[in-house]
Structure formats: structure tokens, C-alpha cells
Amino acid sequence: MSAHDHFSLAAARPDFAAIAAWIPPGASVLDLGCGDGSLLRYLQDTRKVRGYGVEIDDLNIVACIQNGINVIHGDLESGLSGFESDAFDYVLLSQTLQATRHTEPLVQEMLRVGREGVVSFPNFGHWKARLNVIRGHMPVSDELPYQWYDTPNVHLCTLHDFESFCADLSLQILDRRVMTGGSEVHLLPNLLGSMAVYRFKRAA
Amino acid sequence: MNTSNSIGIVSAQRAHFDTPLTFQSGAVLPRYDLVYETYGTLNAGKSNAILVCHALSGHHHVAGYYADDPKNVGWWDNMIGPGKPIDTRKFFVVGLNNLGGCHGSTGPSSPDPETGKPYGASFPVVTVEDWVESQARLADMLGIRQFAAVTGGSLGAMQALQWSLSFPDRVRHVLAIATAPRLTAENIAFNDVARNAILTDPDFHGGNYYEHSAVPVRGLRLARMLGHITYLSDDVMADKFGRELLSGKPNYGYGIEFEIESYLRYQGDKFAAYFDANTYLLMTKALDYFDPARKCGDDLDKAFAVARANFLVLSFTTDWRFSPERSRTLVKSLLHNHLNVSYCEITSTHGHDSFLMQHTHYHEVMHAYLERIASEFSE
């Protein structure tokens, strides 16, 4: 992948750059629901990580192999029993949290196999989503491109929801980036941010 | 026959080795021959070689066909050839008949130069480690210091795995398909029943049936029938044969009535007509003994600590003889050792035999991975 590709990829997926900024060079990374392997490839090229992806879709597995990343066929819903405890520095869940059915056990599993967890998800508290609901419709946007009847998203949440979820699970939030269209949002993040990335660990 | 992407006409070669080979059992084979085929061209850097190891009943004829026998197509022809996943325009492919085999390499049916008679029962029991040792000598002879990849399915994949342990710096990639890091007790049990069918055949003569001009056909046929059942899946048997009766109605006797009976007997007869019973015994023993963890206190993680290769591990959903669970155990140990590994469980109805079948997703995964290997030496 060329530097230009990395630039356009980071522009298309602003959470990638945010995640990469948190990952020190040479770290070991497990990317859950790694899709075609773009994020891992990006982290391999820019941060020299030692990484593995987990993916369930046949076509994505082929794409991962073409992308030159390690991919392990697996279903996140059945846990991470194929991975040893404390095997990774970081376990990533990029734009997948909201589509997982067993969300709570999965987040627990992330912190069993990894030292820190990183998740990114669309913010259901974004003003556009709220406006849609006030107008009487389920939200459809760049971040939430599905209709109510064909969405894979079963566990959508707001920033507030995720933060209280972390508190309930005794997880310590280490870092947060909230974005809209690639720019960082500092003011009223739960209202103005369309996407969020969190880094967290088990509370000491 | 579709010859458009076949490697075309191939021919076998024979290599003779005079350096004695000491087997894991302690037995010594003073000299031996290995029969092999090669496809494609070894590049100047000798970095594009792929070794294909065969499974229980396989041999060196892996791809293409013979000029004088065009119907005799190699056993993995759908995988190897120009434009196929193992692309012979990019790779130099080596296939051999393993020691103990019955397709030309030195084995129980070959004449022992000491006595002039076939080795028979005196041919030493061969292990996967012994095979890999002999394969390394063939590689030396061919001028290949390091294979780009070693691959195979089932028992063939065990050899590929063993390469990463016996010669960590001589293999860059291991493609291990439909295999296991060791057989389960159930799996050994199937092999033992197969062996017993042969060993108790009155025509076996303690393994020296050659000098009695006999062949333990009944035992070999039974062994193959049993094996064949375990290589298929319930689904594929139901789909292919179901409960169809040959004559359309029951005859209330013990003749061949169901389609599946007819099929199994046909497979058994076909196999017994060309395969050597002693070789069958040896091959199943090699399967049973393969257990790299054993020397490391039953710790597979420790066994793979010496490995340096990159791995592609593939399993098939309906393979109950070498189940996906067995492959996942292997993957876990590779992960433990921080090795590069990709794993894919292919959805297929064909059971253990899936690794030999034309299957779109399976071949796409292989193609993608082999492209990656090719890009390493073409850059």
C-alpha cells in the first residue's frame, strides 16, 4: 500500500487514524471483525504492528489474505476461545460493536485476551439521529446507512450509554476521540459527534 | 479432458540415494530410490519451489498426464497448473512418492538389494519425520535450499508441518490442509481396524505375500472401504447414494443391494488391484505416530517454538476424520508462538475428501495466499 493509499484510507475511515495514533510501533494487535483487513494493513504499514484479524465472511477472508494480513476465521458471537489470555497489547473492534449480539461478554473477552481494548462505533446520540427520531423515523445517515429492516446493527448506543456501560463493567476509559466527517469534535460531543473511538482497560 | 489449463504431458524421474537413512525407529536403509515429478521452472534464485506431499494413497503424479496414458491425471491437477492456485508459470512444483510407497520409490514391494527379494515385512516402519528427512535430501539434489512453500492435505499436511519443525529455515510457508497435529484415539482406531483387515487376511503371509504369489486383496479391500466411509460425510453419502436400491426393491439377502454398497465395493476392488498392502500398513502407522507434541511433554506450544515459517491452515466443515476443531488446536499453538498464520474453515459437503475437490472458495483462498507467496520472490 502506498503513502497515497494510506492518506485516502485515513480520510475515508477517520477512526483508523485515531486508532493508529494510540498504537505504539511494534505492538501486538487483534482486530475483531477485521473486514477486508484494511485497518490491520494500515497499522502494519504505519505502526509495524504484529497483527491478526478475526473475520467470519468468506469473501472478506480472501480479501484479508490478498491484503497480506493474518486472518483467523471465527465468529465473535461464540467468544474468543481460540485466543490465549493476555496474548495481545490491543484488541480492536472497529465499527462492529453495534452489530454484535453478545456485546457484554465480547467486551469482557476483549480484555481477557488483550491488555487494552479499542472500539469505534456510530453515535446514536448525534443530532441528526435525534432529529430523525423526533420526525418519527429511524435514523439513516453516512454512519448509519441501513434501513430499519435490513440493518445489522442490533446494539446501537450513544456516547453516554457506552460510558455508563464501561462504568457498569468496571472498565476504565483511557482515551476518547469523537468525530464528525473526519474532524474532531470537542463541543457537546454526544450531540455533535457522529462517531466515537474509545480506548479502555480493566479498572485496577 | 480440459487440457487448456493443464500442465500437459509430464514424466516421472528417479533419484538414487546412497547415503544411509536412519529412521526414527533406529532402522537403517542403506540406499533407496525416490520417484518424483516436477512442473514449472526453478528460477535463478531457486526461491520459487513448492513441495507437494501426498496423503495415504497418493504418489508423485500430482498434476498433468502421461503421454502414453492421457487418462492418468495427477491427483491434485485441479490445484496445480498454469493459472491454477499453485501456478506453474510462477512456481517450480515438486511431487514425490514417499519412502515405503508402492509407486516407484523404495518400499516393501521393491527388491532388497541384499536378498534380491522384495523387502516385504522387513521394510522398516516409516514416520513423517523420516519422510521429511528423505524429502530434504531430494531437495538438496535438486539444488533447493529453501522451499517457498511445502503443502499437502491430511497426512501430506502433517509432512508440511513437520518441515517447519525439522528444517525451520528451509521452508517459508506451510499450507496445511485438512489435517491435525496428532490423531485422536478414534482416528487411530479406524486405522487399526483397517490394518487388522490386512493382517488377518490369510493371503497376507506375515507381509511376505510376494513370494507366495498372493495378494491380500480381501483385507486391502476392507481397509479401503472403511477408510472411504470416513473420508466422506453423512451429507454427501445421503446426497450421492441415499437409500437407493440397485434393483429398485429389496431382495432379502446379502448381495449388493444398496447403491452405497455397490460404490464401496467398487472403490475397494479398484484400490486393491493397484495398491500394496504393506504400504497401506506403513502409511496408516505414519499417521498414528505423528505427534510433534509428544517429544515436548505433550505440549504442542513448545513443539512449534522452533518453527519460523508462515502458515495457512485450512479445514472443512464436514470433515469429521480431521475436524476443524483439530485445526483450531494447531492454530492456537501457532498463535502462541507469535507465528504468522491465517486460518479458514471452508464450508463443504465432501468431508475429508474436500481437500481434493474443485471448490470455488477453497481455491480462491489458496490462490490468494499463493499470490502472496509469489509476490515475495518476484519483488
Image (cartoon, grey):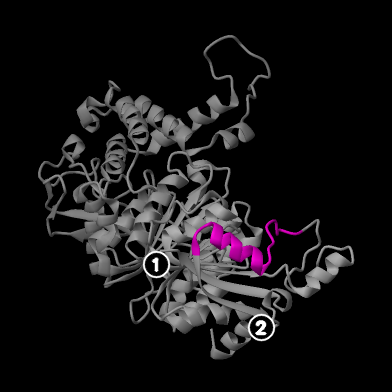
Q: Chain of mark 2?
A: A
Q: Amino acid at mark 2?
A: Val
Residue B338 visible in the shown view: yes
Picture quadrant of residue B133: bottom left
Residues shaded magenta: A151-171
Please determine whether, in this image, residue B245 is positioned above or below residue B78. Answer: above
Q: Residue B297, image x and y in percent? A: 20, 47
Q: Residue B154, image x and y in percent? A: 40, 48
Residue where numbered disc 1 is placed: B340
Identify the mark at residue A185; answer none if there is no mark.
Answer: 2
Q: Amino acid at mark 1?
A: Asn
Density class for disc 1 (Cα within 10 Å; few <14, some 14-19, many ≥20) is many
Please determine whether, in this image, residue B369 is positioned above or below residue B300. Answer: below
Secondary structure at numbered mark 2: loop
Secondary structure at numbered mark 1: loop
Q: Residue at x 44, y 53 (%)?
A: A82
Please determine whether, in this image, residue A130 is positioned above or below residue B261. Answer: below
Picture quadrant of residue B334: bottom left
The quadrant the C terminus of chain A occupies is bottom left
Does residue A71 appear left or right of residue B152 in this picture?
A: right
